[in-house]
Image (tube, coloured by chain):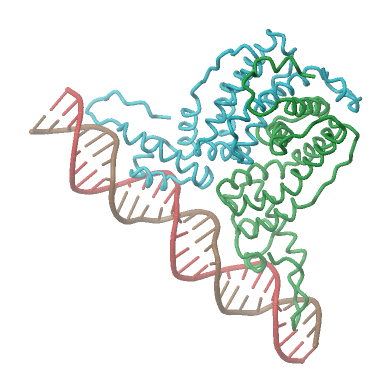
Chain colours: A cyan, B green, C brown, D red
Amino acid sequence: MATEKRRAPAGAAVLRDDITSAIRDAVMHELAVVGYARLSIEAVARRAGVSKAAVYRRWSSKLDLVLEIVGSVAGQRLLLPDTGSLTGDLEVVYLIMSRALRHPLASQIIPDLLAEAARNPQIGQTLQEVLRNNQQALGERLIGLAVTRGELTAIDPVAATDLIVGPLYWRLAIARVPLDPAEIPRLAAAVAGALQAACQTPLSSQDEGQLVAQQQ
Amino acid sequence: MATEKRRAPAGAAVLRDDITSAIRDAVMHELAVVGYARLSIEAVARRAGVSKAAVYRRWSSKLDLVLEIVGSVAGQRLLLPDTGSLTGDLEVVYLIMSRALRHPLASQIIPDLLAEAARNPQIGQTLQEVLRNNQQALGERLIGLAVTRGELTAIDPVAATDLIVGPLYWRLAIARVPLDPAEIPRLAAAVAGALQAACQTPLSSQDEGQLVAQQQ
DNA sequence: CAGCGACGGAACGGTTGCGTCGCGACGTAC
DNA sequence: GTACGTCGCGACGCAACCGTTCCGTCGCTG
């Protein structure tokens, strides 16, 4: 948490930007290759071609280092267009997500950090904030648009997020089966169907047996 | 890979079963608490109240240890009943899955190992085999039943698995938001809707705009 | 040109884990 | 009762990192 360039206090000499960014790159690489648990400052410095002291001058610890860097990388907000239909919006979202998760760095780092988050509250919180800011807001906007269009009625945003994010995340980050872009429309249509079915099912109905037939 | 009791070769003395199972428990605990990357034989032995040598007498390495134990724990097949409807079947599956993932050991270990699997081919392969045997076969049976009932037409089993497993896994293992059992019917209904929508969307249609309306 | 501060490099003592070994103490089969 | 194999315990040498400290160099600022 100390990356911005110093405004020379008295003499001179500033934390060099090229070194800072070399360290940032090295951290992302190491995270992808060995994961957070095995990440060592020594290896980061080695990969960055930099002395350990140079790292410690900028960040106080491994946790600090990772939180700041991951937070800044993932913190970029993305806004999606209103395509005029729920399915269309979903397709755009999936296109963006699948492109992001195709990047080997991301697809290695994200599951690793999410697993680590279950263990380390700090990481969990940072990830929550970052992801909330992006995908939750994005999901809510997407649903809000669909509701105003009349494609959906009100729906629990958490449940909706599960339905929207879950399948693609499972496919790309967990099962690691590549997704042909041509499949995206079908995925989007399927999830749209899930959202609509969720709207039409009030909570805790005991008569689940015949729900399937009334589907429209 | 050497857990079965020896049939005394000459003298006597057998690897004691109580110690073997103490080690197994300890491994599961350590996996949950620190994860695979940080798991050390020393800590396992310490927790099991056992000497390091006792561990090495049974398994040759950390990888061997974890593969054998996780494989045997997760290898238990579960078969689900035919409830007579797709939604009903899904509810049963989700009930079982959510109970399994509510167990703190499982909900910590599974995401950790899946993340590790992206890095370690051996773990990946073991997990694939184990999970294939369970959930993929399970998913295919579930879809097969729905098809014979006329609830679905043919569907890509991989895509179907994404739709079925993704949302619940995301919710419980990644987002770690608890799932009220009362929500399960709605989730099942939503996923059934997704599967049906997926059946009605042939691959790579360019006219996604009006798909949403034809939903029945 | 003088001084400050970041730089790489190298070392520090301390911690943790590795995989192996030897010891004496059981307990069991022959 | 003798021989064997596992047991806990403790130690071994080796390796990797930790976080810190000192050095001499270099480049910028004033």
Quadrant housing the C terminus of chain A:
top right
Which is more toward the observer, B47 or A26? A26
Give the side of residue C24 with respect to residue B199, left or right: left
Q: Dividing the picture into quarters, in which one does residue B159 lie?
A: top right
Q: How far across and how far down the image is residue A123, in percent?
A: 56, 34
The residue sitting at 69% across, 38% down in the picture is B158
The residue sitting at 69% across, 51% down in the picture is B129
Q: Dividing the picture into quarters, in which one does residue B46 lie?
A: bottom right
The residue sitting at 55% across, 48% down in the picture is B119
- Up-down: is A59 above or below B64? above
Q: Dividing the picture into quarters, in which one does residue A37 lie?
A: top right
Q: How far across and how far down the image is residue A129, in percent?
A: 57, 25
Q: How many marks?
A: 0
Which is more toward the observer, C13 or A149? A149
Quadrant housing the N terminus of chain A:
top left
- Up-down: is A139 above or below D23? above
Give the side of residue D20 with respect to residue A90, left or right: left
The residue sitting at 48% across, 36% down in the picture is A66
Q: How far across and how far down the image is residue B73, in percent?
A: 75, 53
Q: How far across and how far down the image is residue A60, in percent?
A: 43, 37
